[in-house]
Image (tube, rainbow, N blue to C red):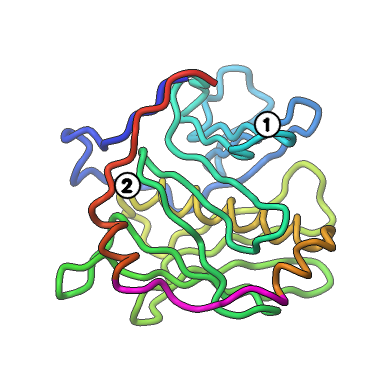
Amino acid sequence: MEYSHDIPQEKLGTSSSTATLKVDFRWTKLKAHITTVEADIHDPSTVPVYTLSFQTLKSPHLIFHPGNDTTSVIGTGTIHAISINPDYELHGKPGTIKALRRFHTVYEHISSVLRNPGGAPMPMTWTSDTNFKTWDFVCVDDQQNPVAKFSTNIWMVKKVGNIEFMDKNISDELRDEIVVTGLTLYYCMATRVNNIFNLFGAVFSRPGRHSEEEVEKRDDKRGSEVVGS
């Protein structure tokens, strides 16, 4: 499995007109296809925007591939048995989605794409809301402007939900980041619901925002190439 750690220069500045993606799980194959809302997943010629592979017994637990090319990797997500802070890698750069509160879904990741006016990587906050039917995860920037929303249908087995981007011209780099962090957080929360050890992890956790040192390290990290699966 090849891990491409840097975004190709020719992709910088490009954008996607895809404003909404849909997530279809295929549990029998431990995969999910992430496609445009217009795509017909039953059509053999349909190429997904992303393919998500699951590894339940070893880490990383989530592996994000471009299109249907499972030999290339965009990012990964890792869930922990006790810690409530999932880890991820995006184009080879490692990061952590940190809980800001113990018993409420408020998480933060440091963007590798967006920056604040001072030039530092921008903190992005994820919150959630749920009712009898849906479970929504909303990502906002450091000014509380909505960036994206992942809405899941609690009762659906295959067509789990949609990822909606507030800017229809979102860059490919930011779209990658939202997909990787959003689905990693969703998988983490779905796991926490059924994992008593995460309850102890929440009790003894130290929630809080990333420190300035962590932000600087996040900005400097270039990741390492991973070969093999």
Q: Residue at left 36%, top 38%? A: 92
Where 114 sits versus 41, above or below? below
Q: Which residues are magenta?
A: 203-212
Residue 4 is situated, as x and y percent measured from the top left of the image, at: 34, 29
**Type of secondary structure dominating the magenta stretch:** loop
Q: In the drawing, does residue 223 fall left or right of residue 61?
A: left
Q: Residue at left 37%, top 63%? A: 110
Q: Residue at left 84%, top 72%? A: 132
The residue to which callout 2 is attached is 173
Q: Which mark is residue 31?
A: 1
Residue 226 is situated, as x and y percent measured from the top left of the image, at: 41, 26
137 in the magenta segment: no
> What kind of element bears circle 1?
strand
Amino acid, disc 2: Glu
Mark 2: few/some/many CA within 10 Å (<14, 14-19, 20+): many
Q: Residue at left 16%, top 68%? A: 119
